[in-house]
Amino acid sequence: MFDVLTARQEPGGLVRIRQQDIAERLALTQSVVSREIGQLQDKGIIERQRKGTVLIHPLLAGYESLTHMVKPPQGPRHARCGH
């Protein structure tokens, strides 16, 4: 599950993916995906944002550069990135 999230993350760890999409990709039920997402959140690995969006912990997230890790980019260019 975490592999799917990291593969879909934008720089800084933002992941836009619906639980239904994860379930279909991994051939799981949506309830299993929801439980797994909850466990990742309980362990502090991810943080649920709004529906269909999670944020991977900064120490585990991918960054474009060290500068982006220290000061994540902001603005519309990065908000619309789609991976």
Image: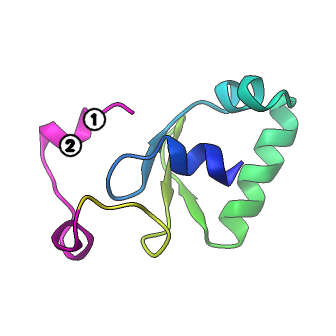
Residue 50: percent from left, percent from top:
48, 42
**8 is higher (above) or lower (below) than 38:** above
Secondary element at image label 2: helix
**55 is higher (above) or lower (below) than 29:** below
Residue kind at label 2, given as amino acid type: His
Lateral position of residue 62 relative to residue 28, left or right: left
Lateral position of residue 47 relative to residue 66, left or right: right
The numbered mark at residue 81 is 1
- In the image, the segment drawn in magenta is 65-83
The numbered mark at residue 78 is 2
Crowding at label 2, few (<14), some or many (≥20) Cα neighbours within 10 Å?
some
Which residue is at the front of the view, 11 or 52? 11
Residue 35: percent from left, percent from top:
82, 49
**1 is higher (above) or lower (below) than 57:** above
**Quadrant position of residue 33:** top right
Residue kind at label 1, given as amino acid type: Cys
Which residue is at the front of the view, 42 or 24? 24
Lateral position of residue 6 relative to residue 58, left or right: right
The answer to whether mark 1 and mark 2 are in CB contact below 8 A is: yes
Secondary element at image label 1: loop
Residue 64: percent from left, percent from top:
25, 58
The answer to whether residue 52 is magenta is no
**Quadrant position of residue 58:** bottom left
Lateral position of residue 32 relative to residue 72, left or right: right
Q: Look at 53% across and 51% down and name the residue there.
A: 6
Q: How is the image coloured?
A: rainbow
**Quadrant position of residue 23:** top right
Q: Look at 75% across and 23% down and name the residue there.
A: 24
The numbered mark at residue 29 is none
Tell me the CA gap for discs 1 and 2: 5 Å
The answer to whether residue 79 is magenta is yes
Q: Look at 39% across and 33% down and name the residue there.
A: 83
